[in-house]
Amino acid sequence: MLLAAGTFALVAAAVATHGGSAAEAALGYCFAVGFGALPLLTSRWPVPALLAMALGVVTYYTLDLTPIGLAAPTAAVLYAAAEQGRARAAALVAGALLAASVVARLAEGDDASIVLGVELGSQAALMVAVIALGDAVRSRRSLRAEMARQAAAAAEEQRTEAARQVEAERLRIAREVHDTLGHAVSVVTLQSAVAQEALADDAPEDAMAALAAIHAAGSSAMAELRATLGTLRSSGPRYPMPGLDRLAELLEGVNRGGLPVELHVTGQLDAVPAVVGTTAYRVVQEALTNVLRHAQATRVDVSVRVSAARLSLDVVDDGRGAVLPGPDDHGYGLRGMSERIALLGGTVDVGQADAGGFRVHADLPLPGTAR
């Protein structure tokens, strides 16, 4: 709007100051209105506006109206077109108008030194300046838009990464809670049944042993829950996550429940990194939980083999073989087991054992070794 008003004012002032007849003045003011309207159209139609401006200038001087120069009617349109990304088209139109003006004035007999000297140089410099200014404004606006786009993309990426981390932590905690409570509840369920039978058979010693096993399972579950929930707090004690050093304790709890479990270890467990040891512990824990829930087994063998590059473990029972998860299980345990192992680049295989029971086999690479 300011460009339109400025153009109209410049052209109208030039018409008013040079006098002439009333008809010429009226026609000049009409051209002033037209030149003033063109900048308003340039934002949507830059090239047609440039052509209309050039045609208007040529028509104005063809009608031999009051001289108004080239800058007044052209500067605003040249600037607006360059701002819209049409700097080359603006430069071509400006050059054509300058060339036409020089030829016309020389043909009329004007002094060549003046036409080709000061006037041509000043008009050319002014046109180049307004085109350069418009292009610079466009470039700056584009730069600001690009920076805003990059900032928005960075913010969105941060939000996505934050959401991913929250989801990963949620899944990790869900796995920890499932493994901890699942195993403890399975032991408690089994031992409570043993205690009931012992009381029914008037065997208080067996009932006390079962209750002691229930107490031990509950205490272990509470300790692990404190360790898991501690990750959600910024303060308070942190408990170490269970690893292979607590594998014997885990198996002893199952043994006390009446299910014999034998542990076979090959290699040095102390050489296993904590994160791998915790994952191996959880795999064995989940496998034993499934045995207690579904297998109706009388014996379980747990084998752990540690080499320089890998850790392998097997949990094999002599139960009824592959059993689908119950209606309240949904297979979360096996899924969590697979997720834990996949995070470390390992593999897990579950299915029928050669002797007819169920077998869980996991293979985990040790950090710093080729996978």
Image: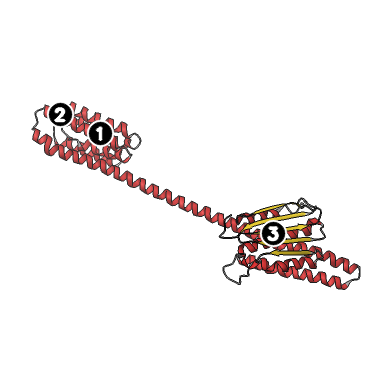
Residue wearing tag 1 = 92
Crowd tier of the residue under label 2, counting other residues whose Cα lies within 10 Å: few below 14, some 14–19, many 20 or above: few
> In what element is the residue under mark 2?
helix
In three-dimensional space, the C-alpha distance between marks 1 and 3, rounded to whole angstroms, equals: 79 Å
Above or below, 23 relative to 185: above
Q: Residue at x 49, y 54 (%)?
A: 158
User: Which residue was labeled with disc 2?
Assistant: 103
Q: Position of residue 1 (x, y in %)?
A: 30, 41
Q: Secondary structure at mark 3?
A: strand
Mark 1: give few (<14), some (14-19) or many (20+) Cα within 10 Å. Answer: few
Total marks shown come to 3
Q: Residue at x 73, y 66 (%)?
A: 250
Q: Earlier in the sequence, mark 3 or mark 2?
A: 2
Residue farthest to the right? 201
**Left or right: 213 in relation to 236:** right
Answer left or right for 318 relative to 364.
right
Q: Which mark is residue 313?
A: 3
The picture places residue 277, in percent across and down from the top left corner, at 64, 63
